[in-house]
Image (cartoon, helix red, strand yellow):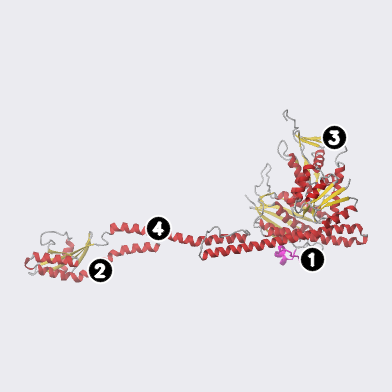
Amino acid sequence: MNRVLIVDDDVELCELVTEYLTSEGFQVETAPDGPSGLERALSGEHALLVLDIMLPGMNGLEVLRKLRAKSRLPVLILTARGDDVDRIVGLEIGADDYLAKPFNPRELLARARAILRRAQSPLVGAPGSEKVSVGDVDMDPAARVVRRRGEPVELTSVEFSLLELLLRSAGQVITREQIARDVLGRQFFPYDRSVDMHVSKLRRKLGEAPGGGERIKTIRGIGYVFARPSQPWMPTPES
Amino acid sequence: MMLVAATTAFILYIQRDIFVNRWRASMEAALPLYAGTAAQEYAHNNLNALNAYLERLETTSGIHGLFLDAGGMTVTGRSPHLPKSLVDQALSSGKPEFASFGLNDYALMRIAGSQGQNYLFMVRRQRGPENSFLKVRMNVLTWALAALLVSGLICYLLTNYLTRPVLNLRGAARKLAAGDLTARAGPAMGIRHDEIGELVQDFDRMAERIEELVNSERQLISDISHELRSPLARLNVALGLARQRARAEAGAQLDRIELEAERLNELIGKLLTLARMQTASSPPEKEPVDLHELLSEIAADADFEAQERGCGVRLTDVSGLTSTPPSGPRRNGLVLGSTEILHSAVENVVRNAVRYTAPGSTVEITLSCQDGWAAIDVRDCGPGVPEVELAKLFLPFYRLAGARERQTGGAGLGLAIAERAVRLHGGNIQARNLAGSGGLQVEIRLPLEK
């Protein structure tokens, strides 16, 4: 399915983007404001939502929040360049990726394609891939479940793929380019913060490692690594 | 106050002498008269006449007179206990002699009696006002002290009344100058209806006007930039469409359009950043900034970008700085401020360096620590900047003479942003040409918080 919903109050822009994406093989629907956009998004008829954060009235973040309460529809948010707050908060609330306006339509295309590809099939690991465990974190990709010390952890699809990549390569350093390619399904652009954002969100959701310190370490100048714990973690009887 | 105290003491001191000398002068003249008259009255041992005279003298002139024989005793046999030296002196000189002892001043003179024998006439004066000098002195001193305190208090209150509002005004003016546009002098002062009160009111009105003007200008820049984004966004997509449809030959022209659109875009972004920093007097956040991490990130990203031209970016850290000290001895200084703003600043400087450095060369970034300051050094292997233009490098929109034609030039805002950002954090930024190897060195210094 390649239906895309674009929610943006700039009608002319919507027309142009529709034309562009259509000639690239997408089916595009547009909505000019928050409420109607939210309604259409919840219809379940689309594979991707492109959402302008700067919507007047019910603003984009609100739409996103309300959407995420009920749906896992992949979302690409359009932010204002230089406005980091919106971008960070947007990714926090559960956007899969962001793009700053004005954007190069080629980038929009690349990111949209990546998100759709990922939604259709998991990029990391073979279909029906086996469970993987490192320390106190268990992951079952087939069931799309992640547990930390036995407790389930809520992750977005991007975070899930990211964690899977890190767990399967635990102890090895993964570069940001690799993450962009394997998890986001696109090229890593310079000054692109989305990989860092997702990593930091994942960190926060997983919390500290049992012995203290970060589970996902930053290796400066190179990338990230999921640290193998020094002692094996044993589930205690009451947990 | 000092003057009052000094004068009082002086007066008290010389007061005594003035009185005495005046009395003595008058006695010089009057004593022979009194003495002579007394002697006459006493002629023929007429004690009653003498006493009557002495009484008259007392009542009319207030003079205490005594008629004494040559031995210094009264004719009735009482002794005024005059010192022998004074008696001898009077007897020998025949002129009025003076002495002061105890609480009295004495004047003594020899006078001849009706039968030629020697008599002495004495006038005694109790020290009047200054007699109770000793008693009164305490009193006067107390009064003087009281006067001192009261005048001191009055001086203090008066000074306060006048200078405190002036100091208040100065404080508000300084805050305004430093960038706090909400600074006002009125509230701290209360209501006054005099000239100073009016001055403060005028000042506040001026401050309000300035705040209005600056804010509306800032808002204007911000609004313009936002508004410019919409057509730019549409332009970009239209360009994408054009590329989809265009034949190969049009490729170069479309590239050019895209380039210019991108420049417009960057310019808008930078204008917004600059506007945001314009009116701030201190960074919006005051958290510890991990310079090492900041620089590593920027270096990595810039290196990525630089590789397109075959160049590289390398970071060397000799500072020993860290905001989250791991185990082991590390220096404990931090830079407090906004990570985002400093990121902007350094990024602009580094990207500039990458733009101008010679193909195949490496841009060097060095982080070091120099007594209380963190120093970030960015060196490139480019053509450098003419000496006369070094100082102007950080002005907004300032571009080197030849730069407008070159593809590498930006809009001239990057360094202005860097300068403002660094200044916001209490630091400074400088550009120097590197001797020998050529190229430009930009040094950013930021104060470390202990």
Q: Is residue B412 left or right of B61 when viewed as pictured? A: right
Asked whether the residues under marks 4 and 3 belong to the same chain, the reply is: no
Residue at the (32%, 59%) spot, across then down = B140
Q: Which residue is mark 1?
A: B404
Q: Which residue is mark 4?
A: B149
Residue A1 percent across, percent down from the top left: 89, 45
Mark 4: give few (<14), some (14-19) or many (20+) Cα within 10 Å: few
SS at badge 3: loop
Mark 4 near mark 1, Cβ–Cβ under 8 Å? no
How far is mark 2 from mark 1, CA to CA?
100 Å
Identity, as a three-letter code, of the amino acid under mark 1: Arg
Q: Which residue is mark 3?
A: A130
Mark 4 near mark 3, Cβ–Cβ under 8 Å? no
The mark found on residue B22 in the picture is: 2
Of the two numbered discs 4 and 1 on the same chain, state the one appearing first in sequence.
Answer: 4
Of the two numbered discs 2 and 4 on the same chain, state the one appearing first in sequence.
Answer: 2
Chain for mark 3? A
Name which quarter of the figure residue B90 lies in.
bottom left
Of the two numbered discs 2 and 1 on the same chain, state the one appearing first in sequence.
Answer: 2
Q: What range is drawn magenta here?
A: B385-403
Identity, as a three-letter code, of the amino acid under mark 3: Glu
Q: Does the magenta stretch mainly form a helix, a strand or a loop? A: loop
Frontmost residue, B29 versus A126 = A126
Asked whether the residues under marks 1 and 3 belong to the same chain, the reply is: no
